[in-house]
Image (cartoon, rainbow, N blue to C red):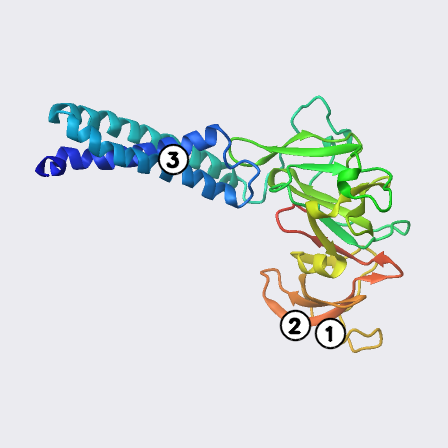
Amino acid sequence: MKKFFKPARIAFYLLMLLTFFFVGLYYAGWIDAGKGQGLAGGAIVLGYGVLFGGIAFIASFFIAFYSKLKLIIRFNWVLLLLLVIAYGITHYRYLQRKKPKEAQPNFKKTPTPKTKAEPTAMLNFTDTANYSNSEENDIGLGFFKPNFFEHPTLYFYGNITQGKTVLQHAPQDSLALGRDQFGDFKLISAPPYLWPEAMNQQFGIFYFKVITVGREFIEVEVNSKNGQTASMNKNQGTLLFWPEFLLTTNTISFVSGKEQTPKIKPLANASKVNISFANMKVIKVTQNWLKVDLQSKDNRTLATGWIQWSDNNQILINYTLPNIQPSP
């Protein structure tokens, strides 16, 4: 038994465990074990590391028993070198991934990579969170936010046959996103007409205005410039009707030429809240009214009030969304 507990052999057991733990992690990355698994992807990759490390740890006892001490010492130096290299590579990749976010904390725009099917609309599209109000635009029912973590490819459908399921329809087009070496989303393919209401491609965030809602399909506006629509599988993302959507906004402001004075109640003839403020943040939604925090430039709440956000199916506010740059 004493043979198992020599310092060099104890070091050998630990080095085998740690080194092959990293081997398992890199093997999982090489075979894309966690790809398309959403939040479970990290646990799957970690599981490979634990599996490889555990097998190596058990095997190290047999190797140590049948190997001479001098050979074990040589193994230790080799394993230590491999462990340092693996840690160095992992730490370097971590720093490289963090570096762009530190240099540009306000979310940099990712240029669209060149592909065989470049979407001409998206090539000119600027990440934006400001709704452009128009007397001709219907505000729709809300917005659809696809989940590219679980569904990397978003399918667009044409005419829908009532009574048939999603699987019984053939898609006409698709929007496909992949991941780069840093885990950010990158465009693989998209239809040339695609122009979402708002987007941040790097983070996989897209918002499409919803026109109609069915049991399995939703009709969305795939080009916010010309009003072109298509149908999507409702289960490939999150449907946000206007009240839910407005509660996700960072700040709101009045559309130019339609400024209001906040009221103390959601009534047109209610008393006004006469206070100077810089920002508004939504805290409650009714059919046509919003209760908002009236904030200073440093986001301190000065008071609360009610404003109208829609009138005659027209929106009266602009808004900014998390992780999306407002248009200049």
Q: In this rendering, does residue 132 appear at all? A: no
* Label 2 packing within 10 angstroms: few (<14), some (14-19), many (20+): some
Q: Please give the label number shown on residue 189.
A: none
Looking at the picture, how far across and down is residue 274, in whole percent?
73, 73
Amino acid carrying label 2: it is: Ala
Q: Nearer the viewer, residue 265 or 177?
A: 177
Q: Is residue 302 left or right of residue 317?
A: left
Q: CA distance from mark 1 to mark 3?
A: 54 Å
Q: Are marks 1 and 2 in contact (CB under 8 Å)?
A: yes
Report the label total. Answer: 3
Q: Is residue 4 left or right of residue 154?
A: left
Q: Secondary structure at mark 2?
A: strand
Looking at the picture, how far across and down is residue 106, in whole percent?
58, 45
Q: CA distance from mark 3 to mark 2?
A: 47 Å
Which residue matches tag 2?
A: 303
Q: Residue at x 78, y 73 (%)?
A: 266
Amino acid carrying label 3: it is: His
Nearer mark to the viewer, of 1 and 3: 3
Give the quarter of the figure containing the N terminus: top left
Nearer mark to the viewer, of 3 and 2: 3
Give the quarter of the figure containing the C terminus: top right
Q: Nearer the viewer, residue 281 or 69?
A: 69
Which residue matches tag 3?
A: 91
Which residue matches tag 1?
A: 273
Q: Earlier in the sequence, mark 1 or mark 3?
A: 3
Q: Earlier in the sequence, mark 1 or mark 2?
A: 1
Q: Residue at x 46, y 40 (%)?
A: 44
